[in-house]
Amino acid sequence: MEAANITCCARGTLLSSVASQHSTTSLASPRSISASYTSKCLKSSSLFGESLRTMPRSSLKVSKSKKSSTLVTKCEIGDSLEEFLSKATEDKGLIRLMMCMGEAIRTIAFKVRTASCGGTACVNSFGDEQLAVDMLADKLLFEALTYSHFCKYACSEEVPELQDMGGPAEGGFSVAFDPLDGSSIVDTNFTVGTIFGVWPGDKLTGVTGRDQVAAAMGIYGPRTTYVIALKDCPGTHEFLLLDEGKWQHVKDTTEISEGKMFSPGNLRATFDNPDYKNLIDYYVKEKYTLRYTGGMVPDVNQIIVKEKGVFTNVISPTTKAKLRLLFEVAPLGLLVEQAGGYSSDGTQSVLDKVIVNLDDRTQVAYGSLNEIIRFEETLYGSSRLKKGVPVGASA
């Protein structure tokens, strides 16, 4: 059997449109879901805006190397989401799941612009108040995973217990997601987003972020984008939601370079964490550009889009870790590291941290190589990534 060697590359100029034909045959409802449930999910709640439809498999551009029989498939700027995924992976179940999540993100983008931002009378089991828009996004994503046919278990920040989605354990996936990260700033019209990670099989504990087969963000701002990383496809890939409702591949990121841009989360920790204060003072002294919105999705996404910078969220004796490893930190870690960046909890990549409990929390930094070295050396005196002399605040 020939091994697939995936190469993702740009065509040079952005295609203004991609010809894509959709079949008119609706997907059959999962056998484990009643007809009334399917009707309710897809019509009453308008999960996908219209019934999710199948598309004919795109023609793959496959070439053979003269020196080997390895298949080389090019993922090009201008591809539709379905075309890209068909080239990037041979796993039809993963393609189906990522397509369904893309449809849910498309619907959430519309709902965020029109839904209530008021609080509900509910709190989730972590004690966080749930906003109406949080719960709506949560419902849409669970429905999408059920309808994908390939998700075994799923859980979210709003429903942090394993939910059986009816998919297979073998050959299927388990998904953890934050339905609307930054929902508390929706009413101020700041950018917010969805985060999710995909693990093979039926386990979401006793695994690490490095075990993920895919991760993604849906970003709801002036532009709606779907940023994905597949474990076996180099780079992190951005898709833009076009006016006609289709996703178009517009950017690949394969390298995070050095650059003076910082996003400092949890600044209150500088009060009783002098090392974190020293790091922030270094950024200010060296005239870094401050780019911080209070939303983790846009603050991390800008590192991928701008291909530079650093995001930090540090703990202290009086400010405990808030960010959840399973729902936020690990998926974003895969996106950043696949883009050529680095992540750290202070001593190791966040992708190497074992997820023991669904509610595990951690401090984190994402960024370029030297920024993560600086982060680790300033806070803990040494860096596992160190090559040569110390950098910046730790020098």
Image (cartoon, rainbow, N blue to C red):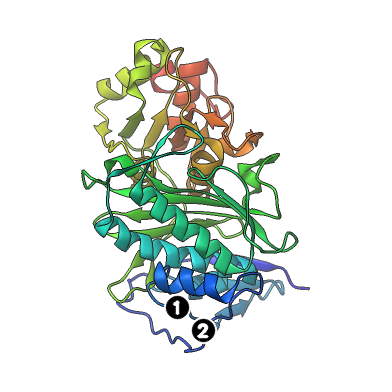
Q: Label 1's element?
A: loop
In front here: 379 or 359? 359
Q: Residue at x 52, y 45 (%)?
A: 159
In front here: 222 or 1? 222
When the figure is inspected, residue 316 is found, relative to residue 110, above or below; the finding is: above
In primary-sequence order, the first of circles 1 and 2 is 2
When the figure is inspected, residue 109 is found, relative to residue 69, above or below; the finding is: above
Q: Label 2's element?
A: loop
Crowding at label 2, few (<14), some or many (≥20) Cα neighbours within 10 Å? Answer: few
In the image, what residue type sits under mark 1?
A: Ser
* Residue 208 position within the rendered picture, expressed as x and y whole percent measured from the top left: 65, 41
In front here: 266 or 147? 147
Indicate the quadrant where residue 374 lies: top left
Q: Does residue 77 appear in this view?
A: no
* Residue 20 position within the rendered picture, expressed as x and y whole percent measured from the top left: 42, 84
* Residue 197 position within the rendered picture, expressed as x and y whole percent measured from the top left: 55, 50
User: Dot 1 corresponds to which residue?
Assistant: 51
Marks 1 and 2, how far apart in space?
Answer: 7 Å
Quadrant for the C terminus, please.
Answer: top left
* Residue 359 position within the rendered picture, expressed as x and y whole percent measured from the top left: 56, 34
Q: Residue at x 47, y 68 (%)?
A: 41
User: Dot 2 corresponds to which residue?
Assistant: 26
Indicate the quadrant where residue 263 lies: top left
